[in-house]
Amino acid sequence: MATVQIDNTTFQLLHFTLQWADNALINGHRLSEWCGHGPVLEQDIALSNIALDHIGQARSLYQYAASICNNFDSEIRQQLFASTALNQKISKGELIDEDDLAYLRDAWDFRNTLLVEQPNSDWAFTVARSFYFDTFNFFWLSSLQSSSDSVIAAIAEKSLKEVNYHLRWSSEWIIRLGDGTMESHQRIQDALNDRWSFTGELFQPTEADIAMLSMGVGVDLSRIKQQWLDRIHAVLNEATLIMPTSVWMQEGGKQTRHSEHLGYLLAEMQFMQRAYPNMQW
Amino acid sequence: MTTKSFQEHFDNQIENEVSIEPRDWMPDDYRKTLIRQISQHAHSEIVGMLPEGNWITRAPSLRRKCVLLAKVQDEGGHGLYLYSAAETLGISRDEMIEQLHSGKAKYSSIFNYPTITWADMGAIGWLVDGAAIMNQVPLCRTSYGPYARAMVRVCKEESFHQRQGYEIMMTLANGTEVQKKMAQDALNRWWWPSIMMFGPSDADSPHTAQSMKWRIKRFSNDELRQKFIDVTVEQAKLIGLTVPDPNLKWNEETGHFDFGEINWDEFWNVVKGNGPCNKERLQARQKAWNEGAWVREAAIAHAQKSKLKAAKNNKQKSETA
């Protein structure tokens, strides 16, 4: 069988959408792990709320990604993912949906950043991860509101309203912990230092990022990197915390090379679909 | 007014269905009974987040994941309203939580049963929330105002949860063989504990008579249990599931279902701490609380610093003005 030439632009749009969708799902999933275990009831509720926003955003994005997939010729569709389960569906001529993308791909088809798949560890590590990611997400979405792709612009606009609140929530916690007790100050500083090495990847453009930027669909990551640094610096300053110093930056998630954590997360998340395939729930 | 006239006034209010409010005089035992009942109810919401929270990370679709997460979040919200209602009686949330962790305060025993399969999310919504609604709807008219008002909100959301649970069960019952089996298995495990949720038989319920007199409670345990069984048996039939009670039979004369003997030995054992998950549930709550201690301390410390800073700024402003 001759390999069919894939329309590169649409292919990059798919990867671009999945990068964003996977960030939302994995981050939302991690935050949902807190449900019932938060340090105080109000925060338990707040985190569940935020988790719901992220998973809701992921759903819109996966629906868009699925429609992009379904528009490819069937021969091309079978080359898109390494997942046997997904390809079986496609080879039967079935259309794929949001759940297929979330539940049937293995880690090597996921495009989220390493940052969001890092474990919750404790409250400080969760707040640090959220703060770095929410700040990124805020500038990312602000920029995407003017995307030339109308679906992407619409999802960005809707999501930004939610992310405004996320950013306020995580920034306030950075300040509360930094300018709280000696213990909280130390804990949040340690967490910020530790998670810092996962922030470089947020701004590393992939092939999809570059292609989408050139078409007016995507984001200029170098521009939002400066905005991100400025905002992080301002909040840490108010929190009496020190900006972590540059270290070697971890990367690979956006290129589908993940940490060990993602495999376990997926094993848990995808358990039902794997153990009881092809059913309606 | 003398104590006697206070008592008369209170009795009159109860008699005339005028709600009792936090600033009103009330008998000590009325207050104690309410604190016990409302805090137990609040704890049940919070501990109840655990068995369902257990499936958030494994829900079978993104829609189900969102619905379940939102539901468990609602339970947390119910806990909040109820703790607030109890606080109007002169006990702090921290004190109530301390009583939960020390084992002095109870929570609904149903949450000491494990959630083993996805169908348990359906069974809990359908049966456990269904039973809770039977208990709680009359509480919307309970004599203590803040409790009654909290329950109006709780009941609205619970009836939504009950429908969601039933819809999960219906989807499974209309699904593949293994899904039907999963639904029946969940019903088999949750049926008896659910009907035990109404508490001991009237003859063995120490608080019922007084609570009914005070109009905290409006129906007896057995009345509510019967009502739940009558409704739920029909719902099970509708989706082709079998209630696991061989003695269940429609009684033309009474107009109710007769049902088999409840295993009260199991009920009292689970209440005493011997249920399958009593230890895990309490440990999970204690762990969350203990590990969160430094976070709560930091929040308090920061709030105090901010207050001081604001006061200082105000002072400077007024001096320069």
Image: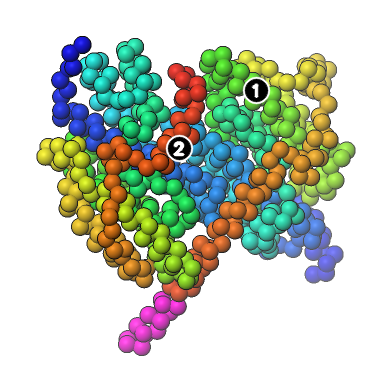
Left or right, B296 with respect to B4, comes to left
Residue at the spot of label 1: B185
Q: Secondary structure at mark 1?
A: helix
Residue B13 image offset from top left, x and y in percent: 75, 54
Q: Does B308 appear in magenta?
A: yes
Left or right, B98 with respect to B264, comes to left
Identify the residue at horizontal 76%, vertical 28% (top origin). B226
In the picture shown, does residue B45 fall above or below A122? above
Q: Does residue B237 show up?
A: yes
Q: Could you say which quadrant of the image residue B119 lies in?
A: top right
In the image shown, does A151 or A39 lie closer to the viewer? A39
Q: Quadrant of the C terminus of chain B?
A: bottom left
Chain letter, disc 2 residue: A
In the image shown, does B118 or A53 lie closer to the viewer? B118
In the image shown, does A193 or B50 lie closer to the viewer? A193
- To the question of a shared chain for discs 2 and 1, the answer is no
Q: Are marks 2 and 1 in contact (CB under 8 Å)?
A: no
Label placed on residue A264: 2
In the picture shown, does residue B317 fall above or below B36? below
Q: Which residues are magenta?
A: B307-321
Identify the residue at horizontal 54%, vertical 26% (top origin). B168
In the image shown, does B289 or A192 lie closer to the viewer? A192
Within 10 Å of disc 1 (Cα), the crowding (few <14, some 14-19, many 20+) is: some
Q: Quadrant of the N terminus of chain B?
A: bottom right
